[in-house]
Image (tube, rainbow, N blue to C red):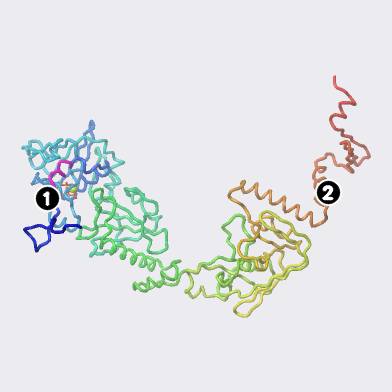
Amino acid sequence: MHDRTATADPESADEPPVIRARVNARLLGKADRLFTGTLEGRVIELLQNARRAGAEHVEITNSDGIVTVQDDGHGIDDFAKLLDLGGSGWEEAYEASEDPAGVGLFCLAPRDIRIRSKGHVVDIMNAGWRGEPVAVLPDCGGPETGTIVQFEDDEWSHAIVSPLAVFSGLNVAVDDCPCPREAFVRKRAVHHPALGCRIEVREAEKLTSWHRAVRRERVYGDNVLVNFHGQTVSFDFHPVSEQKLWFLVDLTGEPTGIRLMLPARTQLVENEAFEALKAALELEAYRYVQRRGRHRLPYQQYLRARALGVKLPEATPTFHVGLLSTCESPEPVEVTMPKGFALARCYRFDADAAADDTDETNIHLLAALGTFPAPFVPVSIRKEYDGYSWAELPVVRKVTLTVGKELHSAGLWSGTLTCVDTLAIAVETSDGKVFSSPVCLAKAPPPEGKDGWCDDAVLVTWDAKDELVPSQIWYHLGGWSEDGDTYDTQLNDFEQELNRFWADLLGPDEQLRRSILAAVTEIRPEWQTVLVAHNGTVTIRLPDGSEKVIRPPDLLKKKSPQK
Ligand SMILES: Nc1ncnc2c1ncn2[C@@H]1O[C@H](COP(=O)(O)OP(=O)(O)OP(=O)(O)O)[C@@H](O)[C@H]1O
Ligand SMILES: [Mg+2]
């Protein structure tokens, strides 16, 4: 049995033993390996320090592999702060607004660096980063104001620095060439003092190329950009279903709970302020949509906006004429809506209430191929729009298919095609109307008692041959398959199968007659009769009574041997 008394602390028998977080000096010994940062990361840290020091200008120069960063800030009073891992020498206000961690400069470790400010200079080298004393020496000829930081690094080129400087609020120049400087958000951005930021909602196409360039760790789909005084992080958040909306969040310098994850500072900490930020973004999204005055948001989001106190207009009526998708290839026969025809006069179809998709197809085909005294226009409206007044339309209730006598039937492509002498579809609608018409194409219902998948069965009348193009029939027989040949090749194969079907309908030998006819049509000049003998000899009689005889090659050889 476990002996509990053996582990008890004899001096605090009543109090439980406690543990406490502390920084072990060994960590400092490894400080030069804590941050294996990137060049971008180093640029960000040094620009950030310059800005916090109140600088307006930062001059970056590259010379013989040495980078020099000079700012015109208030300079360094306490050099000890430079190497105080976890300690900062900035004014109190920065604590609440920017959460300095006192680690930034360590991104330069273990490089040799020289820092000059206010008549003093330090050279931090090797062990200096790990706790060895570093002398602060007097410096004549140092900068009059501000600070100079020098170290060995790859080139801090204009191209690398520009996206990190553009929204920093600083005037940055690289080798005397100024970097662009722009406002991250426009004046219309909404101030959220509690979060210490301003938020602007912008359509994707209105972003500047700098907004697109600044994301350090690009993730496809990210649509929120948060600018921490020049350093920008992104995440993805879509409170409303408008993929093209972006959110620009500009930190103002007020106290904020929005925090960057250490040490890389490339993403936000998912804390309470982050949740509050997301709530603010949602609200701003709806306000943006309200200002724009039109939208296509689902009804649930319309209700959500209202719950947040943002009254939106109803979504723009969003519908598709016809019930079959026209985005697929091939396309089905198209249903058209007469010009100026009101949506309120159209019909919806409740796909959930139907046993299979045959009804949906036949309603579509009736509307596309039928003729009526008054137009019959079925439309599809996505379910998410249910609730808007314009989406409440009468529905098609009952579909009846009347099929005449079968003339010919054959397996075709991925289903069965049957030609009948007459074919008609009738529908009854919830507003008490009946629309019926003969059609040249319909989908046959699945056989009685057969559940699940079964071959497509398509019905046509002879008229379909002239009224439809083959691809409109192909659509209902499986259409193009991604796994097979190119679209054109597959369509060509289908057309041949379909031609054969029509020929077989006319008689058992019709296909043969057509094949022979297809072969002789190539004969020039025009011929009157063509006689094909069993031995392979072809005799062509021309309109003037003359004859041309073509013999098989071996017969030719026997008759007139070549030398
Ligand atoms: N360019 C500068 N001008 C004036 N003081 C500076 C400058 N760079 C650094 N310092 C001083 O050195 C300290 C340490 O800088 P460091 O970048 O390591 O940490 P931090 O800026 O306080 O915090 P963090 O960068 O982790 O957010 C600063 O707090 C500041 O006192
Ligand atoms: Mg810093």
Work out whether 119 lies above or below 337.
above
Instruction: Name which residue type carries label 1.
Output: Gly
Bin the neighbour count of mark 1 within 10 Å (Cα to Cα): few under 14, some 14-19, many 20 and up.
some
- Image position, residue 534 (x, y; %): 89, 39
- Image position, residue 470 (x, y; %): 69, 55
- The span from disc 2 to disc 1 (Cα, nearest Å) is 98 Å
In the image, farthest residue toward the top: 563
Instruction: Please state, as top left, top right, bottom left or bottom right, where the N terminus lies in the image.
Output: bottom left
Residue 220 in magenta stretch: no
Q: Quick one: label 2 or label 1, which is nearer the N terminus?
A: 1
Which region shows up in magenta?
A: 22-30
- Image position, residue 291 (x, y; %): 37, 67
Q: Is mark 1 within 8 Å of ligand 1?
A: yes
Residue drawn at x 60%, y 74% is 396
In the image, farthest residue toward the front: 1
Image marks 2 and 1: residues in contact by CB distance under 8 Å: no
The answer to whether residue 348 of the structure is visible from this angle is: no
Instruction: Name which residue type carries label 2.
Output: Arg
